[in-house]
Amino acid sequence: MNLFEEIEKEKEDFPKVRTITKEMESVHLNFYQVFAIVIFVICVFLGIFLGNLFSTCQASSYYYTNVCVVKEFNFSLMIVIWFISLIFCVFMFSIGHIVYYLSEINKKLGKNRD
C-alpha cells in the first residue's frame, strides 16, 4: 500500500473556466437572491465608507480633553456592518432559495393536474 499511488488515484484536476461558466449558466436567480447579492455589495462599500466617516481617536493631546490629535479608520465599525449585512443577506438568499424550491414543486404539481 503506497501512499503516493493512492494520492494519484484520488487526485482530480482543478475545474476549467469553461466548465464553471457552463455550470453558472444553468443557475437562474430569483428576485430575492439578486436582491441579497446587491445589498451585500452595497453594504461592503457602506462599511468602508462609514468606517472612514466615523473615525476613532488614536491619541489625544491630554488625558482629560476632547481634542483628538490623530484620527484613524474605525475598523470595528466596518466589521460590525459587514457581519450584520452578511447575516441579513444570507437570510434573504435562503428565502429566495426556498421560494425557488416551492415554485419548482408548484410547476411539477401543475403538470400532474393536466
Image (spheres, rainbow, N blue to C red):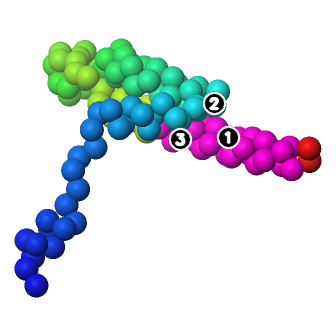
The residue sitting at 20% across, 26% down in the picture is 58
Using the rendered view, name the quadrant where residue 10 is placed. Answer: bottom left
Majority secondary structure in the magenta region: helix
Span of residues in magenta: 86-112
Q: Nearer the viewer, residue 92 or 98?
A: 98
Taking the magenta stretch, the answer to whether it contains residue 91 is yes
Q: Say whether marks 2 and 1 touch (CB < 8 Å).
A: yes
Mark 3 or mark 1, which has the lower sequence index?
3
Q: Nearer the viewer, mark 3 or mark 2?
A: 2
Using the rendered view, name the quadrant where residue 45 is placed. Answer: top left
Quarter of the figure that contains the N terminus = bottom left
Residue at the spot of label 3:
90
With 1 as the anchor, is 50 left or right in this view?
Answer: right
Mark 2 or mark 1, which has the lower sequence index?
2
Residue at the spot of label 1:
100
Q: Nearer the viewer, residue 9 or 67?
A: 9
Residue at the spot of label 2:
30
**33 in relation to 90, above or below:** above
